[in-house]
Amino acid sequence: MYNSKIIGLGKYVPENVVSNDDLSSIMDTSDEWIRERTGIENRRHIKKGDGNSTAIMGYKASIIALKRANIQPKEIDLILFATLSPDYYFPGSGVILQELLNIEACPAMDIRNQCSGFIYALTTADQFIKTGMYKNILVVGSENHSGGLDMSSRGRGVSVIFGDGAGAAILSREENNKKGIQSSFIYSEGKYAKELSLIGPSTNRWVPEILDENDPEDISYFPYMNGQMVFKHAVVRFSEVIQEVLNKNKWSSEDIDLLIPHQANLRISQFIQKKFKLSENQVFNNIMKYGNTTAASIPIALSEAWEQGRINNGSKIVLAAFGSGFTWGSTSVVW
Ligand code: UT7
């Protein structure tokens, strides 16, 4: 059995910086409220006409990851594309990325697990590498939230949180089983599906139905989040799944060189940091700059941590996520 090693990372965020003050000028919110409740100061939003889409941002992050991995697109055996905001209803963004990369025929699969999407995608990629079926896998998390948010005061509980961006990782076969991905855990609990969801348009609420009703009060096509409930579940599940991965590796908190939590809310990361008695240096946060980019948040953070020299040969890394579904998961990596 092989292990999977991350041999290249890349990230891309749109140039357009949207500050809390920018949002305060279009809805009833404030820099103080957003910073206090979420830690977010800025986020990036795609600007109409800047040429970005979910797949295109994924492409830009992938090109950097491929270059750093020193491999060509044609050496990729599988694309796993994690997103909740695909370019089209169908087909998935994975095939669009495949075309952008000019890869003639390789499987491209979309992973629909929201904030936990990247952990689900890593876990899936790891299985394909372990069995020997594939050697190099491109795993992407990319999100284009901004165009689909309710940017009026009505939507402020959700819209101030989310940002756009993409991250990519190249996983490759590793024969030394002490290196690379050590273990992963993934979970979901569908009874909470609606607590963080976007119901329409969907087969549950087809576009003709929405158009027929022509109801200005209809908010079914904006994301809905029961923030307090999500928060309560997040702190419990993050804690459980981090503990689980530590137990599996026989690691203690002190062994972690870097914990990269999904960037949902700085308060959640701080809660986890305190609970596991981790130092500031052991936890990576960049939600202040980018907001919550759901499936893109972990690969953006991982890439940025690597760029800052916070991940080195032999570093013990823990990745953990929680989000819509509810879904959650964790992965441990020895670099
Ligand atoms: O990535 C997927 C996982 N997502 C998460 O983990 C998110 C988890 N949840 C959260 O992070 C928090 O629940 C939020 C940051 C979303 C909200 O913070 P909260 O402390 O739970 O606020 P709340 O929703 O209970 O609202 C408190 C007050 C309300 O006003 P009243 O009823 O007390 O007068 C809201 O209307 O804050 C108001 N409010 C706002 N005020 C200014 C809600 N959003 C805003 C806003 N600006 N943007």
Image (cartoon, grey):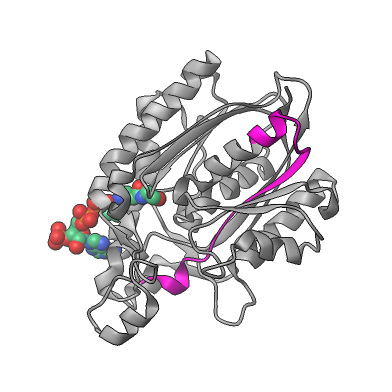
Q: Give the range drawn in magenta.
A: 126-149
Quick check: is 129 in the magenta stretch? yes
Residues 37 and 201: in front is 201
Q: Which of 19 and 198 is in front in this view?
A: 198
Quick check: 66 above or below 60?
above
**Looking at the image, residue 177 lies above or below residue 140:** above
Residue 267 in view, yes or no: yes
| Numbered disc total | 0
Estimate the x, y position of residue 262 in percent, counting from the top left.
47, 44
Q: Where is residue 74 shown, x and y percent of the image?
A: 84, 53
Asked if the magenta segment contains residue 116, the reply would be no
Q: Which residue is drawn at 54% across and 18% down?
A: 255
What is the residue that sits farthest to the top in this orientation? Answer: 250
Residue 189, image x, y percentages:
34, 40
Q: Which residue is drawn at 46% across and 52% down?
A: 114
User: Which quadrant would the C terminus be assigned to in this image?
Assistant: top right
Residue 252 visible in this rendered orientation of the protein: no
Quadrant of the image for the N terminus? top right
For the point 34% across and 55% down, the residue is 35
Where in the figure is residue 190, as x and y percent of width and height? 33, 45
Frontmost residue, 187 versus 181: 187
Q: In which quarter of the image is residue 7?
A: top right
Q: In which quarter of the image is residue 23?
A: bottom left
Residue 237 is left or right of residue 314, and the answer is: left
Residue drawn where x is 44% and y is 27% of the image: 242
* Image quadrant, ligand 1: bottom left
- Above or below residue 322? Residue 275 is above
Reply above or below: 186 against 165: above
